[in-house]
Image: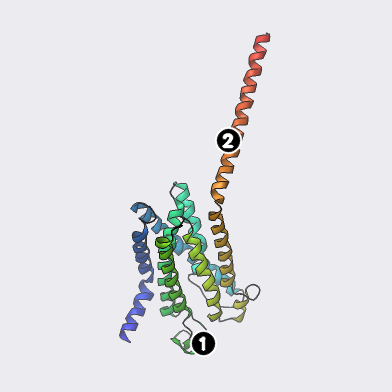
Amino acid sequence: MLGTALLSMILVKYAYYLGMAGMLAVSLIIYRRLKLKIWQALLFTVVAFLSDGLGAFLMGKVYTAFVATLGSTQVANYSIYGAVFLTPVLIIGSAAIIKQPWRNIIDMVALSEMTARAFGKLSCHFGFCCAGFKWEHGVYNSAFDANMFPVQLCEFFTMVVIMIIGFVILYGYKNYKPGILYPIMALMYAGTRFFWEFARFYTYEQEKHFFLGMSMWQVCSLIVVALSVIWLFGIKNNWLDKGKAYVEGRQFEKAEAERRATAAKQGNRKKGKKRR
């Protein structure tokens, strides 16, 4: 009991720092495989960690505001889906601005940030802030004074499995293309989270029916699944390269047309001078 209590205190009180340490450890393990330099690994791991925290915080506020409209006083301090949506935007955007290989970087982040999120799930479980449905064979939750299905532990172990699959893809997949790891891992997380939502306990029944009988998090899951599939199709079909080639072609055509127009004007001026 004493060991469990100590572990619980550590995971609740220091989960934030454990998550950051875990992210750094994973980034330092895989950055060479992704052909990155150590400064790139360190810089973008910090950016990812900060964007994870910011995104999760903002999504928590959105959820709190949403349930307040239903009459619920439930408060969500953080939500992983905020990080899932915000992190790729900030990572890809910042990498593109300073002209760094964003595909390699976002793949590094995909594995490293899953570590922080896993620690977050353990913190939720031991902090009794979230729980599954009431179940006599479950884990006692002091917030509800009842045994509850350990949905947060289930999500934690799901994340561990997803991380293992990510490592296998990164080191074992012969046709690995930079940029595919983030959408694959996001797809797996969102797909499994959709089903774990059925085991989650809701204080207000209306929360389960945010849209078409689905909870807010199940709707987020479907959005992430759709975006991940589009992302993967885009990489497979080189949409970005084709788009870049199209834009460059249009720019070349425009420059060529301007050059011809300028040459024509100069030619007309020369002809006018000769007539005089």
Report the residue at 49% width, 68% height from top: 80
Residue 210 vs residue 257, the one in the foreground = 257
Residue nearest the viewer, comparing 108 with 18: 108
Q: How is the image coloured?
A: rainbow
Q: Residue furthest top?
A: 276
Q: Residue at x 59, y 81 (%)?
A: 204
The residue to which callout 1 is attached is 134
In the rendered view, tell whether residue 123 sits above or below residue 140: above
Q: Which residue is mark 2?
A: 252
94 or 66, which is in the foreground? Answer: 94
Q: Horizontal placement of 221 versus 125: left or right?
A: right
Can I make out residue 84 in this image?
yes
Image coords of residue 35 (percent x, y): 38, 52
Q: Where is the C terminus found, in terms of image quarters? A: top right
Side of 39 relative to 247 (left or right): left
Type of the residue with mark 1: Lys
